[in-house]
C-alpha cells in the first residue's frame, strides 16, 4: 500500500515508490524508491543504459511510469503534471534551445512559458547572461555560439523561472574543464541563494563528490546509496595496483587477504583496508612476482567501478534516502 505523500510533502522534494518503466520487453527502471529532502544535492549515477535518464523523464512528467508512483514538490507526477512542471527546471542531455533564435529570444520564450512578466524576463536574463559572461552574445543566434556557450544558455533557460527543483541530465557532457567549472560555480551559488533542490546525473564522477547523497543505479535498480564520503570510506583505505605477467597466480594468492580484484590487461586492482605500513610489507612479499606495486586513496570513480564491474561488494548500505526493498524481496 502506498503511503500518503502529503505526510512527506513538507520535507521531500522528490518522493518515488516502486517507480518502474518498461519499453516493450525492455525493463529500463525497476521499482526504485526515492526520498530526496528539499534543498538536497542528489546524484543519480550509473553507466549508459542503466535507467538514469528514464528516471528523470518520469519525474519531470515527460514519460509515464509503467508502474509505481512519484511526487515532485508534493505533486503527483501523473495527476498533477502541470503543477510539477511549474515547480521544476530541466536541463536535458540534448540541447532544448531553438538554434534559429537569439540567446535572449530563447530565454524570453522560456520565461513566457513560465508566466513571467516582460520586466522579470529582462531582469533575470540580464543577470544570468552576466554570470556566464554572455552579455555581449545577447542578440547572437544560438547557432553561432560555441558548445560551452550553448550549454550555459541551456542552463540559464532551465533556471530563469527560479524553480524549486532542478533536474540536470549530464549537464556538462562534452565541455572542457573551464566551462564545467563555470557552470558548477553558478549552480552552487544558485543553491546557496535559493535553497533549490538539485538532482544530477553525470559521467564525470568528480562532479558528484560534492553531492549530499548519491545513488548508483545498475540495470534499472539502485544497488548502492549514501553520502559520497561514506561510500568511499566503505570501499577501503587504499586501492592497490599490481602489475604482473602472472596475474592469475597473484589474484589467487592475494584473494584470502585482499578479496576480489578488478583486472585490466596486466594490472590488477585490490581494495585494502589495513594501515599504510602494511602496504610496504605486502610489496616486499610480492617483490619477485610483480613488475610494480602502487597504492593510492580511493575515490568515487573506484566506487563506481567496483559496483558496476563486480557483484562482490554487497555490504549493507548506509542510512540513506534511497531504498530498494522491492528489488531485494524478489531475489
Image (spheres, rainbow, N blue to C red):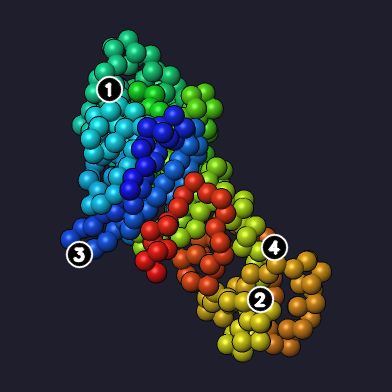
Reading the image, the residue beneath label 2 is 258
Considering only order in the chain, which callout, 3 or 2, is on the residue closer to the N terminus?
A: 3
Of the two numbered discs 3 and 1 in the rendering, the one whose residue sits closer to the viewer: 3
Q: Which mark is residue 114?
A: 1
Which mark is on residue 25?
3
Observer-side mark, 2 or 3, equals: 3
Between discs 2 and 1, the one toward the N terminus: 1
- The relative height of residue 127 versus residue 219 in the rendered view (above or below) is above
Q: Are marks 3 and 1 in contact (CB under 8 Å)?
A: no
Is 197 situated left or right of 319 in this image? left
Residue 13 to residue 319: above or below: above
Q: CA distance from mark 1 to mark 4?
A: 49 Å
Frontmost of labels 4 and 3 is 3
Q: Earlier in the sequence, mark 1 or mark 4?
A: 1
Residue designated by label 4: 237
Whichever of callouts 3 and 1 sits on the residue coming sooner in the sequence is: 3
Residue at 35% over, 23% down: 161
Q: Secondary structure at mark 4?
A: loop
Q: Looking at this rendering, what residue extends furthest in the front direction? A: 1
Q: Position of residue 28 (x, y in %)?
A: 29, 58
Q: Nearer the viewer, residue 113 or 61?
A: 61
Relative placement, left or right, of 146 versus 181 is left
Q: Residues within 10 Å of mark 1 (few under 14, many from 20)?
A: some
Looking at the image, tell me whether mark 4 or mark 3 is earlier in sequence order.
Answer: 3
Q: Residues within 10 Å of mark 4 (few under 14, many from 20)?
A: some
For the residues labelled 2 and 1, the Cα–Cα distance comes to 55 Å
User: What is the quadrant of residue 14 in the picture?
Assistant: top left
Q: Give the residue at x 46% y 56%.
A: 216
Q: Residue lying furthest top in this view?
A: 119
Mark 4–mark 3 CB contact (< 8 Å): no
Image position, residue 9 (x, y; %): 40, 32
Amino acid at each position: 500500500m502506498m503511503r500518503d505523500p502529503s505526510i512527506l510533502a513538507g520535507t521531500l522534494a522528490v518522493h518515488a515508490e516502486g517507480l518502474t518503466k518498461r519499453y516493450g520487453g525492455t525493463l529500463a527502471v525497476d521499482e526504485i524508491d526515492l526520498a530526496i529532502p528539499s534543498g538536497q544535492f542528489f546524484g543519480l549515477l550509473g553507466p549508459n543504459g542503466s535507467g538514469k535518464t528514464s528516471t528523470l523523464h518520469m519525474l519531470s512528467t515527460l514519460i509515464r511510469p509503467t508502474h509505481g508512483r512519484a511526487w515532485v514538490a508534493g505533486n503527483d507526477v501523473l495527476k498533477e503534471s502541470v503543477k510539477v512542471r511549474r515547480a521544476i527546471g530541466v536541463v536535458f542531455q540534448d540541447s532544448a534551445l531553438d538554434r534559429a533564435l537569439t540567446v535572449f529570444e530563447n530565454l524570453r520564450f522560456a520565461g513566457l512559458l513560465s508566466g513571467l512578466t516582460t520586466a522579470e524576463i529582462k531582469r533575470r536574463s540580464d543577470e544570468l547572461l552576466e554570470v556566464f559572461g554572455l552579455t555581449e552574445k545577447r542578440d547572437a543566434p544560438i547557432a553561432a555560439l560555441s558548445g560551452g556557450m550553448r550549454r550555459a544558455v541551456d542552463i540559464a533557460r532551465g533556471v530563469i523561472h527560479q524553480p524549486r527543483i532542478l533536474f540536470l541530465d549530464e549537464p556538462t557532457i562534452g565541455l572542457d574543464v573551464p566551462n564545467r567549472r563555470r557552470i558548477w560555480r553558478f549552480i552552487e551559488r544558485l543553491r546557496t541563494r535559493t535553497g533549490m533542490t538539485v538532482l544530477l546525473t553525470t559521467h564525470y564522477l568528480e562532479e558528484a563528490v560534492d553531492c549530499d547523497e548519491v545513488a548508483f543505479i545498475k540495470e534499472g535498480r539502485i544497488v548502492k546509496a549514501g553520502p559520497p564520503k561514506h561510500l568511499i570510506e566503505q570501499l577501503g583505505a587504499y586501492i592497490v595496483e599490481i602489475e604482473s605477467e602472472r596475474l592469475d597466480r597473484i589474484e589467487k594468492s592475494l584473494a584470502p587477504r585482499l578479496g576480489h580484484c578488478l583486472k585490466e590487461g596486466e594490472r590488477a586492482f585490490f581494495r585494502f583496508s589495513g594501515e599504510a605500513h602494511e602496504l610496504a610489507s605486502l610489496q616486499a612479499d610480492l617483490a619477485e612476482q610483480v613488475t610494480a606495486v602502487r597504492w593510492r586513496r580511493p575515490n568515487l570513480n573506484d566506487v563506481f567501478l567496483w559496483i558496476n564491474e563486480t557483484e562482490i561488494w554487497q555490504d549493507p548500505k548506509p542510512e540513506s534516502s534511497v531504498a530498494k526493498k522491492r528489488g531485494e524481496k524478489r531475489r
